[in-house]
Every structure is written in structure tokens, then in C-alpha cells.
Amino acid sequence: MDNIPGRIWLGCIIPKRHARRAVTRNLLRRQARALFEMHAPGLRAGLWLLRLAAPFPAAVFVSARSRALSTAVRSELDGLLSRAAG
């Protein structure tokens, strides 16, 4: 990719082995895109890849729409994107 546009591009990889339910993976992607847009003004233009490296176990986060899962995802992504922007 020699000619990267002056925009910010986001790719999300959320493996099935880390979030077994499709509804959970979709929720994680939506939250990632929303937080990415919020932090976009502070990020450099280019291609960004977000990959889930550790699982969100269904035993701990019973529902995909649970407040616990939403809070955990938001805090982790917010921290990562804040460091990337700074």
C-alpha cells in the first residue's frame, strides 16, 4: 500500500474463539467503531487494525447486552485508543 489516502481506515478482527456468539462479536464491532470515531481526530491518518487478543468468556459476561461487557469493552478500547492518539 504505497498510496495510503489521507483518511483513517479501521479494520476489526474478532475471532469466534474469543467471542463465541455472533451477537457478541457484532456488539464488540459496533462499540469499537463508535469509540474509534470518537478518537479519530487525535489519530494519524492511515490503516488501523483492531484485533481482539483475549476472550470475553460467556460464563463471566452472560449476555451480549450486559452492562458488565459493555463497560469492560469500552474501558479497554478507550484506554488503547487514548494511548494511540497521545
Image (cartoon, grey):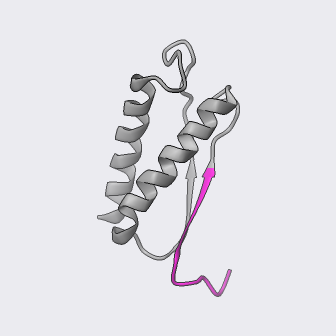
Residue stretch rendered in magenta on the structure: 1-12
Q: Residue 78: x and y, percent?
A: 35, 48
Q: Is residue 84 left or right of residue 51?
A: left
Q: Residue at x 60, y 82 (%)?
A: 4
Magenta stretch: residue 73 in it? Answer: no
Q: Residue 46: x and y, percent?
A: 53, 74
Which of the 4 image quarters holds residue 67? top left
Q: Is residue 75 left or right of residue 26?
A: left
Q: Please state which of residues 6 and 83 is positioned toward the viewer in this rendering.
A: 6
Q: Residue 17: x and y, percent?
A: 69, 29
Q: Quadrant of the C terminus?
A: bottom left
Q: Is residue 29 left or right of residue 31?
A: right
Q: Residue at x 37, y 32 (%)?
A: 71
Q: Quadrant of the N terminus?
A: bottom right
Which of the 4 image quarters holds residue 20? top right
Residue located farthest toward the front when viewing the structure as drawn? 65
Q: Does 39 appear above or below 45?
A: above
Residue located farthest toward the top when viewing the structure as drawn? 59
